[in-house]
Amino acid sequence: PANMFSRALKQSTKAFASAQHARGYKVAVLGAAGGIGQPCGLLMKMNPLVTELSLYDIAGTPGVAADVSHVNTAAQVKGYAGDAELGAALKDADVVIIPAGVPRKPGMTRDDLFAINGGIVKGLVEAIADNCPGAMINMISNPVNSTVPIAAEVLKKKGKYDARKLFGVTTLDVVRAKTFYAEKAGLETARCDVPVVGGHAGVTILPLFSQATPKASNLSAADIDALTKRTQDGGTEVVAAKAGKGSATLSMAYAGALFADACLRAKNGEANIVECTYVESKITDAPFFASKVTLGRDGVDTIHGLGSLTAYEQSALDAMMPELHDSIKKGVDFVKGN
């Protein structure tokens, strides 16, 4: 299964060879006993570039770590529980994945999540600044549009902010867009690529189907509109299907592991690693924005522009900007007010 997963990670098989020439990496998962954290920890245990896997949560992690530690791959697993062990969990980590916080429940907006998850993220990022300031931070905790600006402000206050190393993980939007596009167009899923730009909530999620590869000739404007809305509402689709029992955890863990793998491969010197991710950006007038980014050893190498957009995409882009600005401001104000 480790090999199977590597194939799903496309070029990760190359990592088996290159891992021999690199030092291994320490990855910390914060929120490792949760619905996303558990499968994400398992997937990271299967990654050949990881030599130390640190699983942290407020409770439950000794059990999760014991369980994951039995998987016969190289990574050494350690569990950490409670505030007192957070520093040790993070010490000298290379990549920190943050799925901590509460999930969406039916009827909850991403705003409802903000008050709870904002405080959780603030505390965790303060600990990152103190224990592994050079780590690449992969933010999964929602609302990502606001938690990434929260993290940036916390790091600035601590004098440890490096914009190249802070990422909002929007990979699930890309994963969904690829899946739905391939299904509708009758294409092989593994061969499809769809850039997704903007943010990571509702209308701020903008899949650029006009730039999708391979090109589909059989999709109408109505099809594109339906695919766009389905990608935007993918999270709600899962929340509704789970009927009060949770939100998207498994697909999110997969997407999180994909993005963390891209960070590790870039850190390891692999070239041409391009992923869509929500970063500090100047390609629009929003201070943070998701677009294609080339990753390098130190994090963000190049932020790519949007390319040419259709009229439909341009109007969707224009329509999202007020909400995106508002979410970013909320994050910044949260730290200033606390």
Image (tube, grey):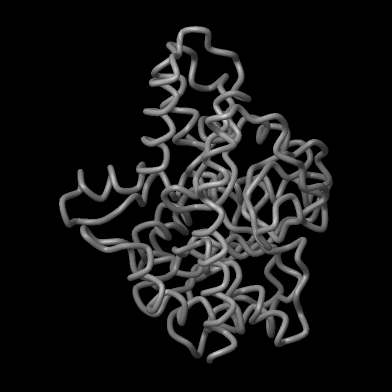
For this view, does 61 lie left or right of residue 129?
Answer: left
> Residue 83 versus residue 296: which sits nearer the camera?
296
Would residue 294 appear left or right of 258 to someone viewing this image?
right
> x and y percent of residue 306 in the render?
70, 38
Residue that appears at 69% across and 51% down: 263
Q: Is residue 179 above or below residue 281?
A: above
**Measured from the top left, where is residue 224 in percent x and y?**
44, 24
Farthest residue, direction top: 217
Apparent side of residue 213 relative to residue 72 in the rendered image (left or right) = right
Closer to the camera in the image, 181 or 134 = 181
Q: Residue at coordinates 30% horizontally, 53% vertically from top-left? A: 247
In the image, residue 333 lies at what x, y percent? 56, 82
Residue 42: x and y in percent read: 46, 52
Q: Is residue 34 above or below residue 304?
A: below
Q: Is residue 211 above or below residue 254?
A: above
The front one of 281 and 59 is: 281
Q: Nearer the viewer, residue 93 or 128?
A: 128
Residue 45 shows up from this direction: no
The answer to whether residue 243 is seen in the rendering is: yes
Residue occupying the point 50% across, 45% down: 205
Which residue occupies 56% across, 22% down? 192
**Outermost residue toward the left?**
243
Q: Is residue 205 left or right of residue 114?
A: right
Query: Count of labels shown?
Result: 0
